[in-house]
Amino acid sequence: MTTILPVAQRGEAILNLIATPVADAEFSSDWLQALSNAMQATMLDRNGVGIAAPQVYISKRVIIVASRANPRYPDAPEMDAITMVNPEIIQKSTQVVLGEEGCLSVPNERGQVERAEQITVEYFTLTGAKIRQEFSGFPARIVQHEVDHLDGILFVERV
Ligand code: K2U
Ligand code: ZN
């Protein structure tokens, strides 16, 4: 059964917290899988290209990144949704790029945000496998936007 969760809106304290890392005991758990499924269903229901657990009132370091072509980024790559647990951006290009962003927690607002063009992210899968992956362009933007959520930062604070 698909669970659509309520999405926290700007001004709600949960969005300003530093989210807690997922504990080792939670990897490969039904709980973590259910959280990922609910986050993905909620993101898709809102036509998002990403979502962070704090946005659905869970202050844990879990994000989903799911780039797809959209009106603002017509040439964005289509990618299978990636669930990242305890993501860390370990490298950022000096080259930055300005781009339009929105946020499921800040409806009816758009803004130009400067992000690193290319990043390297280390994260864990739901079963605890450690992954190191490079992203550039729109997917890199989404990762940076979602990791900001884990650190209590909304894109409007970067406009
Ligand atoms: O975290 C969120 O609130 C989801 C945002 C993610 C996002 C990241 C980078 C740039 C824009 C948005 C939602 O996807 S907002 C809806 C959206 C979708 C495509 C392009 C712009 C905005
Ligand atoms: Zn957002």
Image (cartoon, helix red, strand yellow):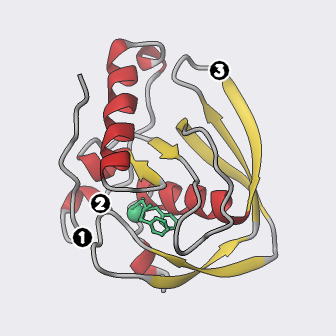
Which one is in front in this view, the residue at disc 2 or the one at disc 1? Answer: 1
Vertical order, 107 against 146 (above or below): below
Q: Which residue is mark 2?
A: 15
Pinpoint residue 73: horizontal percent, then vertical percent: 60, 70
Residue shown at the point (71%, 31%) measured from the top left: 131
Pinpoint residue 126: horizontal percent, then vertical percent: 51, 23
Label 2 and label 1: CA atoms lie apart by 7 Å
Mark 1 vs ligand 2: CB below 8 Å: no
Looking at the picture, which amino acid does disc 1 mark? Arg
Cβ atoms under marks 3 and 2 closer than 8 Å: no
Vertical order, 27 against 21 (above or below): above
Mark 2 vs ligand 2: CB below 8 Å: no
Residue 112 or residue 86, whichever sits in front? 112
Label 3 and label 1: CA atoms lie apart by 33 Å
Q: Which of the two discs, 3 and 2, labels the residue nearer the N terminus?
A: 2
Cβ atoms under marks 2 and 1 closer than 8 Å: yes
Pinpoint residue 26: horizontal percent, then vertical percent: 41, 18
Q: Which residue is mark 1?
A: 10
Residue shown at the point (44%, 30%) measured from the top left: 22
Which quadrant of the rendered structure holds the N terminus?
Answer: top left
Label 3 and label 2: CA atoms lie apart by 27 Å
Q: Which residue is mark 3?
A: 129
Residue shown at the point (38%, 53%) measured from the top left: 18
Q: Which of the two discs, 3 and 1, labels the residue nearer the N terminus?
A: 1
Crowding near the residue tagged with mark 1, few <14, some 14–19, many ≥20 C-alpha atoms within 10 Å: some
